[in-house]
Amino acid sequence: MRYYGEESKSDYEKEKEFIEKKRLAVAKKLSSIEHPNLLRIEKIKNANMCHHEITERDIKIGNRYCILENFCGENFCDVIRKFGPLVPPIAVKLFIQVLDVLSFVSQQGINHPNLRPECIMVNRKGVVKVDGFLDYPSMTAKYTNYICIDNYASPEKLDSNNIDVPSNIFSLGSVMFFVLTGFPPFSGSTPGSIIERIKYKDPVSLKKIVCNIGDLDDIVMKALSKNTADRFDSFDQFQQALLQLNL
């Protein structure tokens, strides 16, 4: 969501190479771990050796492809578009799974770079899979003066592209708000207005929008605190708060 000036091609190439190396390192680490709610990278193959295996969901990094597991589900954005906002008890069950995998992956030294509704999928059985761990900032945004709108970014990510646990907790709070209401907590007609709301405005209370929300409103608002110290200390603490709800 930030505006960048022109930089030399050499700077572009250097940063592109740095990001690609980082993505590949994360991909290799992800391919070595398993979690029931992580969209698994089954293998990483040279691009000229696996054309017959490639699907639209697989991810290209340099001259390699990350082959993802086949999961029959829809992302949260499509689910809400088709069926409308989720009732609190169902939303809580899904986000308990999301927090479980985010905690697990964070313990491996990986935090999600771009957490948003499109990165979280669910199937008909209610099983959640989280994707998008390789979605590092687009080089197009930085070197073409293109302004990318991210309604789910944390205030500190807007300032420094920070993607640590507190930043992820804020983004997940934003996604929860979206799933419960059908719209993000911070929106506007221009990128600048969205940035201003994320950094300086409080979201509307869910109690004014969602029936029978109970204490879930307090949990989401805590996750959306502007000050990182006022948010949950960890994914596990966030998850425990959801587990203790009586909806």
Image: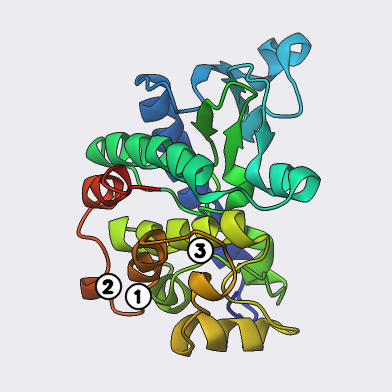
Disc 3 to disc 2, C-alpha distance: 14 Å
Residue 147 found in image quarter: bottom right
- Which x, y percent locates residue 93? 44, 37
Alpha carbon distance from label 3 to label 1: 11 Å
Vertical order, 35 against 207 (above or below): above
Percent across and percent down for residue 100 are 33, 36
Q: Position of residue 232 (x, y in %)?
A: 25, 61
Q: Are marks 2 and 1 in contact (CB under 8 Å)?
A: yes
Residue underneath mark 2: 228
What amino acid type should be assigned to the residue bearing mark 2? Thr
Which residue lies at the image location 37% right of the left edge and 34% below the top edge?
A: 101
**Amino acid carrying mark 1 in the image:** Ser
Q: CA distance from mark 2 to mark 1?
A: 7 Å
Disc number for residue 40: none
Q: Earlier in the sequence, mark 3 or mark 1?
A: 3
- Number of labels in the image equals 3
Residue 97 to residue 208: above or below = above
Identify the residue at horizontal 43%, vertical 48% (top origin).
112
Label 3 with label 1: CB-CB less than 8 Å: no
Q: Name the amino acid, label 3.
A: Ser
Which numbered marker is on residue 225?
A: 1
Q: Secondary structure at mark 2?
A: helix
Identified at 36% across, 79% down, the residue is 226
Residue 133 can be seen in this image: no
Q: Is residue 145 above or below residue 72?
A: below
